[in-house]
Amino acid sequence: MARRKESDQKKKFWQSSKKSDKKNPLDDKAKHWAREWLDAFLWAAIAAIILRTFFFGAYRIPTPSMEKTLLTGDFLIVTKLAYGPRTPMTLSIPFTDMYLPGVNLPWTRIPGYSEIKRDDIVVFNYPVDVAPVSAKTNYIKRAVGMPGDRLRIEDKILYVNEEASEQYETLMYNYRVQTRERIRLSPTKVKEAGGSVLQAENGTAIINMTPALAEEMSNWSEVTDVEFFILPEDYDEFSRRSFNFSDGFMNHDNLDEFTVPYQGQEVELTDDNWHIYQDILERYERNDVDRDGDQFTINGEETNLYTIQKDYYFMMGDNRDDSEDSRYWGFVPDDHIIGKAGMIYFSWDGERWLPRFSRLFNLIH
C-alpha cells in the first residue's frame, strides 16, 4: 500500500509538472495581438509607400520665394496624379533621403489626368543638383514658360510670346518709395500692411510688396512717389553666380528673348547661345561636347546642329525679386516634374509661433 501511495504521489507530481509545461493561453493571446499589430503596421507602411510614390506627396514651404501666394511655413499636398507619377528611379529607403549610389532603375511616367498648363504651381526636382533625379531637392515655382514659348523679361515684366504675362494679385516686387522731406516711413506700418522694408535711407526706401499695396501706399500722406525698383540693364548681377544659363545675361530684371526648348527642336549652337543650351546637352541629355568658340563636337561628330530630346519648362517664383529660379539656373526637364501643388493642409507662422487657421485647406492656384 505504501508503495502504491508513493507511486501515486510520483504520478501526481509528474502530471503537475507536465501541466506547468503547457503554453499559457495569455502568452498565446499576447503573441497573437503583437502579430496582428505587426501585420497592420506592415500593410500601413506598404499603403503609405504606394500613396507617396504614385498618388500624393507632402511639401513644406521653406522660403518666401512664392509669397504672397504661398507663405513660409505652409504645408502642402502635392498631387502626383495630375501630370502622372514616376515609377521609382533609384533604390532608396522609404521616407528618407537615403539611396543606393550608382544604381539607377529603368523608369517611366504613368499617364496623368492633365498636362502642365502655363501658370500652374509645380513641384519639381532642382535640376542643377548633383544627384539622381528623384533624389534631388524638391522645389516649387510657377510654370511661366511652356515648351516652345518665346520669353523675355523687360523692366521686371515677363513677356510670353510677345504678350505681358498675367499679373496675379499675389505677385510681389521690389519698389522704390520716396517720402516727404524729414519724414520716415514706419517699418511697422509697412509690415502691418503686408510689405517688407528692405532698405531705407535719406527719404528713399526699397520695399518688397504686391502691386495692390504699392498703389495703396502711393496715397499715404507721407509718401510722394512709388515705382518699380529696376536694376539697370548694364548692372551685372549674374557674374557672381556659377550658373551656366544666366552667364549670358546681366540681371533678373532684364533677359533678352529666348525660346523654351522642346522635344524635336533643332537648334544651331553658337558661342552666343551656348549658355542657354549647355546644361541641356551636357547635364540633362548627357552628351559629350567639346567646344572651340563657334565650333562644336558632339559625341565625336563635328556639328553645330543639335536636336533637343526632351521638353523643358521655365519656372519663376511669385516673389519676383526674392526668388532664385529659372532666371538664374535655367530650364526644368520634363523628367524632373513631380506634381501639382493642390492644397494647404496646415500653415505655421514662425514669427508668432501660431498656426494660420485662415489658410487651412485652401486650394492653390
Image (cartoon, helix red, strand yellow):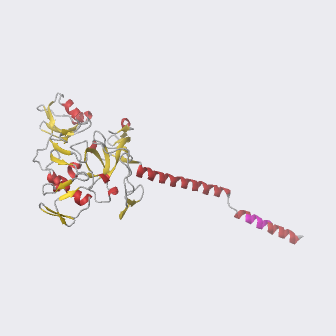
* Depth order, front residue of 282/270: 270
Principal secondary structure, stretch drawn in magenta = helix
Q: Residue 25, relative to residue 323: is it above or below? A: below
Residue visible at 17% across and 30% down?
218
Q: Quadrant of the N terminus?
A: bottom right
Residue visible at 19% across and 38% down?
163
Question: Seen from this angle, which residue lies furthest bottom?
Answer: 3
* Depth order, front residue of 358/49: 49
x and y, in percent, of residue 356 in the image: 36, 38
x and y, in percent, of residue 190 in the image: 23, 35
x and y, in percent, of residue 249 in the image: 14, 50
Q: Is residue 27 magenta?
A: no
x and y, in percent, of residue 300 in the image: 20, 67
Question: Seen from this angle, which residue lies furthest left?
Answer: 234
Q: In which quarter of the image is residue 68?
A: top left
User: Can the viewer see residue 32 in this picture?
Assistant: yes
Q: Is residue 334 left or right of residue 58?
A: left
Q: How many labels does the image show?
A: 0
Q: In which quarter of the image is the C terminus?
A: top left
Residue visible at 15% across and 35% down?
227
Q: Give the range drawn in magenta.
A: 12-18
User: Can the viewer see residue 63 in this picture?
Assistant: no
Q: Residue 219, relative to residue 65: is it above or below? A: above
Q: Quadrant of residue 21?
A: bottom right
Q: In this view, does 338 lie to the left or right of 282?
A: right
Question: Seen from this angle, which residue lies furthest right?
Answer: 1
* Depth order, front residue of 77/159: 159
